[in-house]
Amino acid sequence: MGEFLDQIPDSIQSHVKDITKSSGLPDNDESVEMIAQSWIEKKSVFEDKIADMNMEELDSFDKDDERGAIALTYSGSIVNIGPLVDEVRNVEYTSIGLRSDVPDSADNNASKLAGDVKIDDNIEFEVGPVKSTSPIFKIAVCKGDLSAEEQEETLKETTIALSDEFAKINSTIIVT
């Protein structure tokens, strides 16, 4: 294997290889290493941003939890799960931008989680912007007693910042 791929948890290495196949990059070890390096950078950006935004990581998130959450998938996609308001959530899915087999982004302001969100499991939706996601690597929620509106704003700001940083990372490996 390679320098960067070896730094990624075993459970995610196959996702990195699959992303390479659908990325438009040559299906070779060099491309796998570039995707692996970008994945490591995105993981670091995610961890830094949730710390900056005063968010805390969780291992799971109950589908009936009234708080909102943000999740990072194995594939490096971002899922912004808004707080529960009138039994629905605003949910925004943003892909890593390298895959041709998923939408770049999708949202639904009347989403319902089908089950709890857990690390290493897919997020499934009864109603949502997508039917399901790839497995979840990280989950974070806002700390403190924030209103639904304050949580929405924090999650939106976090998602925008992450999307911008992830796009910059992607631009370093996309061949034009």
Image (cartoon, rainbow, N blue to C red):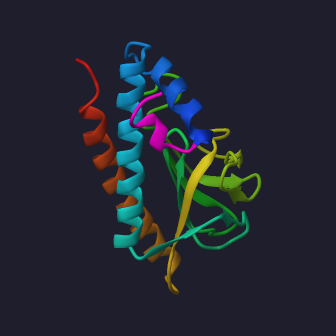
- Percent coordinates x, y for residue 117 in the rendering: 68, 57
Residue at 35% x, 55% y is: 45
Q: Is residue 65 left or right of residue 159?
A: right
- Residue 94 seen in render: no
Q: Considering only vertical position in the picture, is 141 above or below 40?
A: below
Q: Considering only vertical position in the picture, is 9 above or below 56?
A: above
Q: Is residue 126 left or right of residue 19?
A: right
- Percent coordinates x, y for residue 106 in the rendering: 50, 40
Residue at 37% x, 17% y is: 25
Q: Residue furthest bottom?
A: 145
> What quarter of the picture does the C terminus occupy?
top left
- Percent coordinates x, y for residue 21 in the rendering: 49, 18
Which of the 4 image quarters holds residue 170? top left
Residue at 41% x, 61% y is: 47
34, 1: nearer the viewer: 1
In the rendered image, residue 170 lying in the magenta stretch gets the answer no
- Residue 44 seen in render: yes
Query: Which SS does the magenta portion mostly show?
Result: loop
User: Which region shows up in magenta?
Assistant: 1-9
123, 16: nearer the viewer: 16
- Percent coordinates x, y for residue 37 in the rendering: 36, 38
In the rendered image, residue 6 lying in the magenta stretch gets the answer yes
Which of the 4 image quarters holds residue 169? top left
Residue at 69% x, 57% y is: 118
Q: Considering only vertical position in the picture, is 93 above or below 174?
A: below
